[in-house]
Amino acid sequence: MTKLESAFKSLQARNPYWSSYTCLANAIIGKNHSKSDIGQALKKLVDKDDYDKRDRDRLLEHLCSLRKQRNEKIDSESPIKMGTEKYELLRLEV
């Protein structure tokens, strides 16, 4: 089992009401996984009902963009004011 799969399964166990895509996205944030690893995880771990096959390439690009997201937020010197659920998800992982 890869580190990405392990992180995914851990998130899924702690958050049973999250979709499999949401769990994968949160497992990727701030980590330096390769695009091929993310693509394989998308294919293997995410329920096929969570997305349309035609959207797979765009979803993969979005997931790849999350690799840098957390580091940019944490390393920023200015305080971040976000009242969104997205911030809450990130805060849980810190």
Image (spheres, helix red, strand yellow):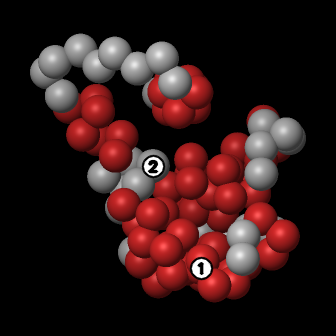
Q: Position of residue 81 (x, y in %)?
A: 34, 15
Residue 56: numbered disc: 1
Q: Could you say where residue 73 lies in the image, as x and y percent from the top left?
A: 29, 33
Is residue 91 or residue 19 the one in the foreground? 19
Residue 44 screen position, x and y as percent: 73, 78
Q: Residues within 10 Å of mark 2 (few under 14, many from 20)?
A: many
Label 1 crowd bin: few (<14), some (14–19), many (20+), radius 10 Å: some
Q: Position of residue 51 (x, y in %)?
A: 72, 70
| Residue 9 in the figure: left or right of residue 59 | right
Labelled disc at residue 36: none
The type of residue carrying mark 1 is Arg
Query: Which residue position is annotated with label 2?
Result: 29
Q: Secondary structure at mark 1?
A: helix
Q: Tell me whether circle 2 and circle 1 mark residues in contact (CB < 8 Å).
A: no
Q: Nearer the viewer, residue 24 or 59?
A: 59
Q: Is residue 22 left or right of residue 65?
A: right
Which residue lies at the image location 85% right of the left edge and 39% below the top edge?
A: 17
